[in-house]
Amino acid sequence: MEEVKSLTLKPREERRLQRGHLWVYRNELERDPLLPDGAVVDVFTDARRFVGRGFYQAAGGIAARLLSRRQEEIDEGFFRARLAAAQAWRARIFPGEDVYRMVFGESDGLPGLVVDRYGPLAVAHAACAFYRRFQEALLPLLGEIAGVRGVIVEMQGTRAHHGEVHTPLEVAMEGVRLELDLREAQKTGLFLDQRWNSREIRRYAAGAAVLDGHCYHGIWTCHAALGGAAAVTAVDTSAPAVEQARRNAALNGVTDKCTFHCGDVEELLKANQYDVVVLDPPAFAKSRAQTKKALSRYQALNTNAMKALAPGGILITSSCSHFVSAEEFLEVLKRAAAAAHRQTWLLGMHGAAPDHPVLVQMPETRYLKCAMMRVGDKG
């Protein structure tokens, strides 16, 4: 085992970490020892009390991520135990299913690592050099999960395969059949966090004219059509995503109800009226400095959506920017309603599905906000 280096915190900087947070910020260190990227480190208070074992990051504001509260060896046995615990939770919440987020970073004790499962295939993604160093151990361990026959690992711009990797493949999730081509998909493939939220559209879809903004692979589109929508318009700025959504609609036998459009959702909102509008944009705030601009963009987009809804219509709108809090997002929706001169009622505010568990001590793991609203006539 390599020598474990030490990081020492400034006085009183350990409190947040001792309460369960897993990130050590660079400005909390007594000094930055400039270690190799991904090196295993022990973190100590200024009084030399052990705080946790983790790995060092050479760049960015986060100097280290904690892996354990014990000085245990970080080896194959460590990874096997963490992966087994993560898989056991998914088997409990999704019994008999084989599409889910298998590892959700910090929440599963493997900070910075994301693993999604699509039937016989596991897809891992990490930007941390630490996981690149342990890649040869992780690949076969992921392949040991029951039913997994192939693994794809994407780390720091490189891609490695293990076992049987066939793409495209067809999977099923929450009653929707989906084709997935991992040669074109973003990051680990599908966006699985909305799996329980997207099926809720069936409550409101019967006989409705639906707009699925930012449709990506068309999961909301398929749920709406299967739920009895009269017509569904799916729009995305990505031409490959729109074509994939079209293929998924065909897989589910709902092509006759669906129209697909590659372009800007706001153009359609300004030109048409709908009974149900879904907005699921990419993260507008990818850093804290972008938050103010992001809030303005969310407000403009949701104002246009409320104006486009028939009285009594349903708006399902999301933010996946973890720098935008649920309270800030609700304030944006309130301002959008005022700008659109529409009364609104909040039917529910939802987060990600439980395969994306929120670590209470780390609010950063609670990133998704999905508001379901009824929009009335002009107030």
Image: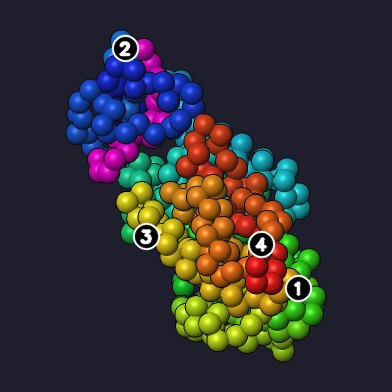
- Give the residue furthest to the front: 379
Query: Label 2 crowding class (10 Å Cα cut-off): few <14, some 14-19, many 20+?
Result: few
Location of residue 120 with respect to 111 vertically, above or below: below
Q: Residue 280, how many percent across, how many down? A: 55, 65
- How far apart in space, not on screen, are marks 4 and 1 (Cα)? 19 Å
Which one is closest to the eye, mark 1 or mark 2? 1
Q: Residue 182, how many percent across, how many down? A: 50, 68
Mark 1 or mark 2: name the one nearer the start of the chain.
2
Q: Is residue 314 visible?
A: no
- How far apart in space, not on screen, are marks 3 and 4 (Cα)? 24 Å
Chief secondary structure of the magenta span?
strand
**323 and 336: which one is in front?**
336
The magenta span reads 48-66
- How far apart in space, not on screen, are marks 1 and 3 (Cα)? 32 Å
Q: In the rendered structure, are the residues bearing label 2 and label 3 in contact, judged by CB atoms less than 8 Å apart?
A: no
Q: Which residue is drawn at 69% across and 77% down?
A: 310
Q: Is mark 2 on a helix, strand or loop?
A: loop
Which residue corresponds to mark 4? Answer: 344
Residue 222 is labelled as none
Amino acid type at image mark 4: Thr
The quarter of the rendered structure image containing the C terminus is bottom right
Which residue corresponds to mark 3? Answer: 293
Which one is closest to the eye, mark 1 or mark 3? 3
Q: Residue at x 43, y 32 (%)?
A: 22
- How far apart in space, not on screen, are marks 2 and 3 (Cα)? 43 Å
Query: Label 4 crowding class (10 Å Cα cut-off): few <14, some 14-19, many 20+?
Result: many
Mark 2 or mark 4: name the one nearer the start of the chain.
2
Which residue corresponds to mark 1? Answer: 205
